[in-house]
Amino acid sequence: MNTKFPDGFMYRPEYFSRAGQQSLMDAVTEAVRGDAPFFQGRMPRTGQAISVVGSNFGPLGWVADIDGYRYAPTHPKTGEAWPPMPQMLLDIWDDLTNYPAPPEACLINWYREGNKMGMHVDRDEQDVNAPIVSISLGDPSRYRLGGQTRGGKTFSLKLSSGDVVVLASEARKCYHGIDKIFYGQSTLVPKGGRINLTLRRVNRV
Ligand code: MD6
Ligand code: FE
């Protein structure tokens, strides 16, 4: 057993074949060309722009603005409902989690050259015990996972296109972030960079 991984951390390298990655990328491209264009969130209180732009699939979408972080049924700019969750995403949720209900939100984050994500814990969900399934597409990245308190010991993992990480049970409460993107190494994302899809259950069953 590898003790450096917290309980509930699952890493599934190459879960998606190149064809599977392409199908997911096509679904993202269609969504952001239509009713769900990428938008730039802002940090609550300070209003500072978040460099990584985002969008969502599903009945709910994660949004960040000056008033806070929350899940909303519509896009903050277009006012339209988010595009439906692609079947492939419902399928991976069933394959990798035992959660008794489907995910309600899939956050689509697009990292461009030089973008990173600071260490954080996802806790805007009503059911903070529901697992989160995270899919990487496009350029590789360096993912960092720490413990349940800020500033403790961390380890890093290189995530490549098609790799999947699940944070469940104890790992769900652990700090994590993206140190860097290895920009320009993949041709999957039409405009370059990395796409991260995170599947979330928001409401308790
Ligand atoms: C990323 N991932 O891979 C950032 N959150 O771009 C996350 O923030 C994340 O990988 C919750 C669960 C799994 C994750
Ligand atoms: Fe996260």
Image (cartoon, helix red, strand yellow):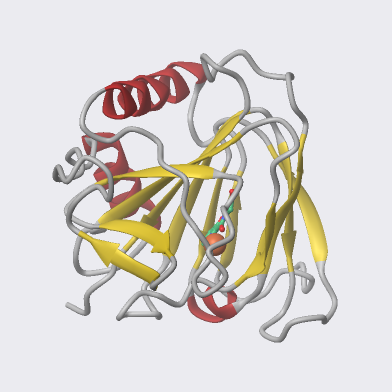
Which residue is nearer to you in this view: 24 or 46? 46
From what the image shows, is residue 66 above or below residue 135? below
Which residue is nearer to you in this view: 91 or 76? 76
The image position of residue 172, as x and y in percent, is 52, 74
Which residue is nearer to you in this view: 25 or 66? 66
The image position of residue 119, as x and y in percent, is 69, 67
Which image quadrant is residue 163 in? top right
Left or right: residue 16 compared with residue 99 = right
Left or right: residue 152 compared with residue 85 = right
- Ligand 1's image quarter is bottom right
The residue lying at 66 percent from left, 18 percent from top is 186
The residue lying at 40 percent from left, 80 percent from top is 129
From what the image shows, is residue 47 above or below residue 181? below
The residue lying at 33 percent from left, 28 percent from top is 32
Which image quadrant is residue 153 in? bottom right
Q: Count the numbered circles shown.
A: 0
Q: Quadrant of the N terminus?
A: bottom right
The image position of residue 118, as x and y in percent, is 69, 61
Task: Identify the residue at the far bottom of this view.
Answer: 149
Left or right: residue 18 compared with residue 141 = left
Which image quadrant is residue 4 in? bottom right
Task: Identify the residue at the far right of this view.
Answer: 153
From what the image shows, is residue 101 above or below residue 16? below
Q: Quadrant of the C terminus?
A: bottom left
Which residue is nearer to you in this view: 7 or 129? 129
The residue lying at 21 percent from left, 59 percent from top is 102
The image position of residue 91, as x and y in percent, is 27, 43
